[in-house]
Image: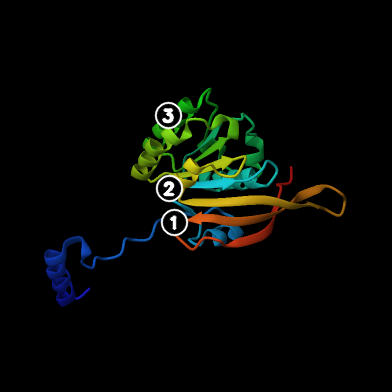
Amino acid sequence: MSDHLQQAITVLQTRFGSAAPRPAAPPCPVRPSGIPELDALTGIGGWPVGRLSLLAGPRGSGKRTLAQRSIAVASREGPVAYIDFPSRLDPEFLNRFNARLDHLLVVRPKSLREGMASVRVLARAGVDMICIDLSRTGSAGLDAELPHLLHRAAEAECTLLLVYDADADDAIRYYASLILSFRRSAWVFRRNGDLEGLQVDATVVKNRLAPPGLKKQWIVPYPIP
């Protein structure tokens, strides 16, 4: 920016305050998911850092596999955590995605408050990405927890993923910067009859950082044992 332009902006800011022109905020940093189709769908090349991204849809829609694959990719760069409310995470499944299991922390909280407290502490301690796997029945009171959670994540530049077995409630929709809705459209089998993966239909329901409404269909492969 030239000196003359900077002087002009300073004069306008002095005269008009908040109505004066100001430099645009820098783009939000992102953490690639490791899934090209998903990164393209977000419109920014991955998950927004310091914000909450929601993967919503019914069970069996592929969202949990995609989130766990993102956690596996992030674990190769630094510490990650998985808040496993349903107690269904299989570390061996992540290992098939070449996850660094020595970088993975698994938390199985007994209550929502306990789980959210764990997220805040881990984010403050420097965990790069945290996935919160939450069933719909365990989400009561989440609206009161999310403001504190997001404040801590933004301060720590921690990427938050929330896996939710339903369409988003209003409170979650409000606080999430990115909402992706998933539906399984078909199972995909190999020639020998073994299950290869599933075909998903994904829609961007909300996006504060890029245009919403994008849709994409692709095959989510299951890792070979």
Residue in the image at 53% along x and 22% along y: 110
Residue hosting label 2? 51
Extreme top residue here? Answer: 110
Of the image marks 3 and 1, the number of the one nearer the N terminus: 3
Residue hosting label 3? 117
| Amino acid bearing label 2 | Arg
Question: Mark 3 or 1, which is nearer the eye?
Answer: 1
Counting from the top left corner in percent of width and height, residue 85 is at 57, 30
Residue 65's disc number: none
- Name the secondary structure under disc 2: loop
- Name the secondary structure under disc 3: helix
Q: Nearer the viewer, residue 137 or 40?
A: 137
132 vs 112: above or below: below
Question: Mark 1 or 2, which is nearer the eye?
Answer: 1
- Contact between labelled residues 3 and 2, with CB atoms less than 8 Å apart: no
Report the Cα–Cα distance between label 2 and label 3: 17 Å
Counting from the top left corner in percent of width and height, residue 203 is at 60, 57
- Contact between labelled residues 2 and 1, with CB atoms less than 8 Å apart: yes
Report the Cα–Cα distance between label 1 and label 2: 10 Å
| Amino acid bearing label 1 | Arg
Residue hosting label 1? 208
Q: Residues within 10 Å of mark 3 (few under 14, many from 20)?
A: some
